[in-house]
Image (cartoon, grey):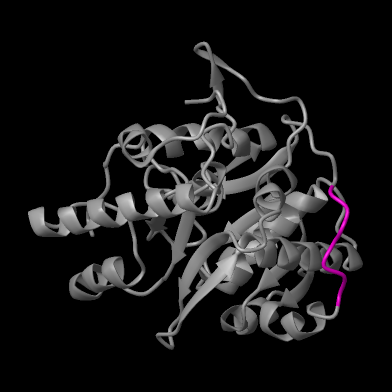
Amino acid sequence: MCDGARLDVDAAFEAFSFRAFRVDNGEAVKLLTRRRKRVAALIGNGSYDAAAVVPALAEGRWAVPDRFNFTRDVVEVLARDPKRRALTYLGKDGVIEPRSFFLIAEGAARWATVLRENGVEPGDRILVLAGKTPDWLEVMLAALKVGAVGVPCPETMSASALGIRISVSQAKLVVAGEASRDEIARIAEGPTAVYIEETRARASSLPDEAPTHDTGVRDPAFILTTSGAASGPRGVVHTHGATFAARLAAEHWLDAGPHDAVWCTADASSGAAIWNALLGPWSRGAEIVLHQEPFDPLERLQCIRRLDTTVLCQTPGE
């Protein structure tokens, strides 16, 4: 499948077998049908190439490049097709908003400029408190682009918990949504805080291109925090090499490919969202679905259909 040859619909469909969430036999058939239609459409418009996704393994061994930056080497590559869809976002107002890789890449470049204007340099830690929105993606991608280390945190963190997270991570900057403003204001001695909503309008006038720091695979990319179920939350450093390797789980666990729309329901602050919403699906050329509301079984099933979801990643409790 990696010889660069074009595939017919049946071959492409068989290459990515169905391993998504199944509601019942009827719903599974609908998801299978949508998946087949996606493959046919991609092949029909010439945008499906089996060699387009770089594998993480070669002859059973890791094939990780020495230099890798996810924003530059995945998102901006996919953005070369200005019409290629990156995500479908369903906001709290119920409006469905598609977004292309081209627009996501532009947004990440603008946020990279914002970060640099606030003194962020390669290796600096950035706390990100944002819901699962396109803004969250663009800020996280911007952090990768400038070589900073993203530290995703829940929007609902208290001032005391935030103070600990800032101290432990030695954060240089906090980027947050308006929902976190009051708790951030209660921190006596904290780093500069940039608020997404008020920065968005100004950022729109910034250049839509920005230089990328040439990160090595051993450079830190994220600090993800454990749940703390056993002995309290612990920050775990993930390198840029790990951002490359995320494609392996997306291939073999999510079974995601260019014909898929992957919906990971995990909170934006979790490692699951980083692996299964930000890194993995896009590494495999798939689209993602963004929608973060409290679990409602009926709404979940309706959204699977409305948002054309083919792969659903959620906790067993849901």
In the image, taking residue 32 as reference, residue 137 lies left or right, namely right
The structure residue drawn at horizontal position 56% and vertical position 36%, both measured from the top left corner, is 53
Residue 311 on image: x %, y %: 33, 52
Residue 149 on image: x %, y %: 72, 49
Residue 97 on image: x %, y %: 50, 77
Residue 223's place in the image compared with 57, above or below, is: below
The structure residue drawn at horizontal position 20% and vertical position 59%, both measured from the top left corner, is 30
Q: Is residue 135 visible?
A: yes
Residue 80's place in the image compared with 107, above or below, is: above
Residue 278's place in the image compared with 240, above or below, is: below
The structure residue drawn at horizontal position 67% and vertical position 83%, both measured from the top left corner, is 197
Image quadrant of residue 185?
Answer: bottom right
In the image, taking residue 121 as reference, residue 99 lies left or right, namely left
Image quadrant of residue 283?
Answer: top right
- Give the residues drawn in magenta, as a range: 206-212
The residue lying toward the viewer, choosing from 259 and 256, is 259
The residue lying toward the viewer, choosing from 261 and 292, is 261
Asked whether residue 208 is drawn in magenta, I would say yes
Q: Is residue 124 visible?
A: no
Image quadrant of residue 241?
Answer: top right
- Name the residue furthest left: 25
The structure residue drawn at horizontal position 83% and vertical position 69%, both measured from the top left corner, is 114
In the image, taking residue 116 as reference, residue 48 lies left or right, namely left
- Name the residue furthest bottom: 93
The residue lying toward the viewer, choosing from 212 and 40, is 40
State the predominant SS element of the stretch in magenta.
loop
Give the quarter of the figure containing the C terminus: bottom left
Asked whether residue 256 is drawn in magenta, I would say no
Labels in figure, total: 0
Residue 4 on image: x %, y %: 57, 29
